Image: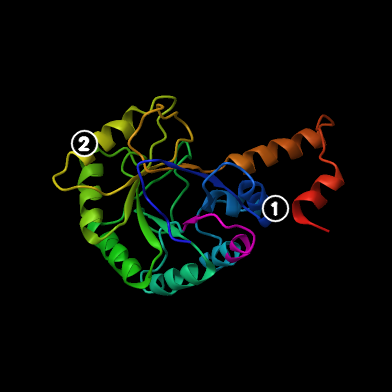
Amino acid sequence: MKLQFSNNPLKILEAHSGLSALLVEKSDYDGIWISSLTHAASKGLPDNELVPLKERVDLTEEIRRITTKPIVVDIDTGGDIRHLPYYIQWFNRAGASAVIIEDKKYPKENSLLENGNHQLEDIDIFCEKIRIAKMASQEMSIIARLESLIARKSMNDALLRANAYREAGADAILIHSKEEISANEVMEFAKRFKETPKCNTPLVAIPTTYELPEIHPFSIVIYANQLLRASLKGMENYLEGKAELAEVEDIFKLVGH
């Protein structure tokens, strides 16, 4: 399913399995996010590109079988630039509506790590990744994820990169921030980016550590890890003897019998 950008923001929720995707399918959310963090964590592994992207292709295919909604896939740094066109084609065939590539050097560390070592990719190299991905993408959207604010670079660095990625052909720009509570960073970026002459590139936000105001300029808002975090808390509560369990019949109602 092709991703549609409009003035009405799409709300996209994370799923890390067919079961969690079924819950999103039956919800009011507009689409499904396949996250590198929750994909790796569900395997008991760290989010540092240890899990091969081919396994995320398989998860995309699994989720596409049970959802009619758009699927947006986190593909980390995209890996080796020579492999990127193959991955893009595979994600397209698996049913992804869009993939998001982040502008860090391989292997990345998770953006929310308190003391993460975030090394940004050279702008020209990342622009070449965007161009290669676009050539292989067919109708699937290619979204460039900006990590300047995560790496504690300047707002000017973020804007410089955003405009380079836009000119390289990115269908949308994701500005990532882990500012706590306030959305000032991403709102300032959006305002200044939209002031660029002839700029109509859609923007994407991931408000994990902050809250967006009710009125904002983002075309897509991704809730990137909430279902896995809820699942983890539920399992911990069960082990501590204080969880409320779903009935087995609830599982049958969801997945069939």
Question: In x, y percent, where is residue 173?
Answer: 32, 49
Residue at the image position 41 percent from the left and 30 percent from the top: 212
Question: In x, y percent, where is residue 162?
Answer: 25, 48
Left or right side of 257 for 153 = left
Q: How is the image coloured?
A: rainbow
Looking at the rendered image, the quarter that the C terminus falls into is bottom right
In this view, the residue in front, 38 or 31, is: 31
Left or right side of 40 for 218 = left
Residue 144 sits above or below residue 91 on the image: above
Magenta span contains residue 82:
no
Magenta span contains residue 68:
yes
Question: In x, y percent, where is residue 117?
Answer: 40, 45
Q: Secondary structure at mark 1?
A: helix
Q: How many marks?
A: 2
Q: Mark 2: which amino acid?
A: Arg
Residue at the image position 64 percent from the left and 47 percent from the top: 26
In this view, the residue in front, 130 or 246, is: 246
Q: Mark 1: which amino acid?
A: Leu
Span of residues in magenta: 61-74
State the mark number for residue 222: none
Residue 129: which quarter of the image?
A: bottom left
Residue 7 sits above or below residue 76 on the image: above
In this view, the residue in front, 140 or 256, is: 256
CA gap between label 1 and label 2 equals 40 Å
State the mark number for residue 19: 1
Mark 2 Cα-neighbour bin, 10 Å: few <14, some 14–19, many ≥20: few
In this view, the residue in front, 233 or 167, is: 167
**Residue designated by label 2:** 192
Left or right side of 235 for 70 = left
Residue at the image position 46 percent from the left and 49 percent from the top: 109
